[in-house]
Image (cartoon, helix red, strand yellow):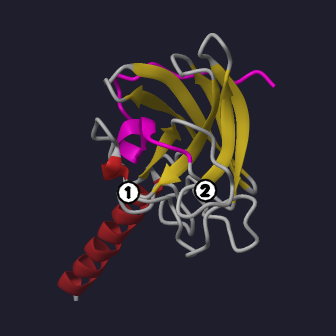
Amino acid sequence: MEVRVLRKWMGMSAAALILAGGCSQKELTSFGVEMFNTDGDSLGTIKLSEQPEGVKFDIVLEGLQPGEHGLHIHQNPECQGPDFITAGDHYNPDNKEHGLLNPEGAHLGDLPNIVAENDGKAQAKLFGPKLTLKKGAKNSLLFKEGTSLIITETKDDGMSQPAGESGARIACGKITEKEAMRKDKKEIDIEAKP
């Protein structure tokens, strides 16, 4: 009898430890994604923040060519230069057509264009509806190993398939739990000016 009670108690204790361990993991609600150009130079950071209806993107970048540039979330957390093709296609878990202006769209990875001023700096606040940073949730940017952010050479026209005629991929940043939790990263406290 005493052995049975001891086994039962040990089993319940192990289950409690497993549950407690799972609850102690910090859920990511905000973190920065460092963006790199094709030469590996940092262009700045895009801060992602969980919001009730999606994800907010605070963009503070420099070193871009002046003008409009496409910004998209891609399906793979890979940023291998010089062309960033390893990032894969746009993040599109719902199999929609490309383009924010497309009545059959858009990809969840389609974001509004950003504008670099004459000095090459770009600051913007964008919103990605239906997206989340909650790992394991539907439409999570941290699904599987994660995703990536890509900036393109020219603006996205909002309609053309498969990527809005937005030119070459010129910058990339990984959206991964590992990158977000890196201890050597400085605490990012940026917010784009309205």
In the drawing, does residue 148 fall left or right of residue 140?
Answer: left
In the drawing, does residue 180 fall left or right of residue 139?
Answer: left
In the drawing, does residue 162 fall left or right of residue 158?
Answer: left
Is the N terminus in the top left, top right, bottom left or bottom right quadrant? bottom left
Write the residue at 75% across / 54% down: 52
Q: For the residue labelled by badge 2, is the local secondary structure a helix, a strand or a loop?
A: loop
Identity of the residue furthest to the top in this view? 119
Identity of the residue furthest to the right in this view? 194
Task: Tell which circle, 2 or 1, labels the residue nearer the N-terminal end.
Answer: 1
- The x, y position of residue 38, in whole percent, is 35, 29
- Main secondary-structure element of the magenta-colored stretch: loop
Q: Quadrant of residue 121?
A: top right
Amino acid found under the numbered disc labelled 1: Gly
In the drawing, does residue 2 fall left or right of residue 166?
Answer: left
Residue that badge 1 annotates = 88
In the rendered view, tell whether residue 69 sits above or below residue 44. below
Q: Which residues are magenta?
A: 166-194
Amino acid found under the numbered disc labelled 2: Thr
Q: Which mark is residue 107?
A: none
Magenta stretch contains residue 174? yes
Write the residue at 36% across / 32% down: 182
Identity of the residue furthest to the bottom in this view? 1
Magenta stretch contains residue 172? yes
- The x, y position of residue 113, in whole percent, is 67, 40
> How far apart, in angstroms, are the residues tagged by discs 2 and 1?
20 Å
Total numbered circles: 2
In the rendered view, tell whether residue 39 sits above or below residue 9. above
Write the residue at 29% across / 35% down: 82
Residue that badge 2 annotates = 132
In the rendered view, tell whether residue 39 sits above or below residue 20. above
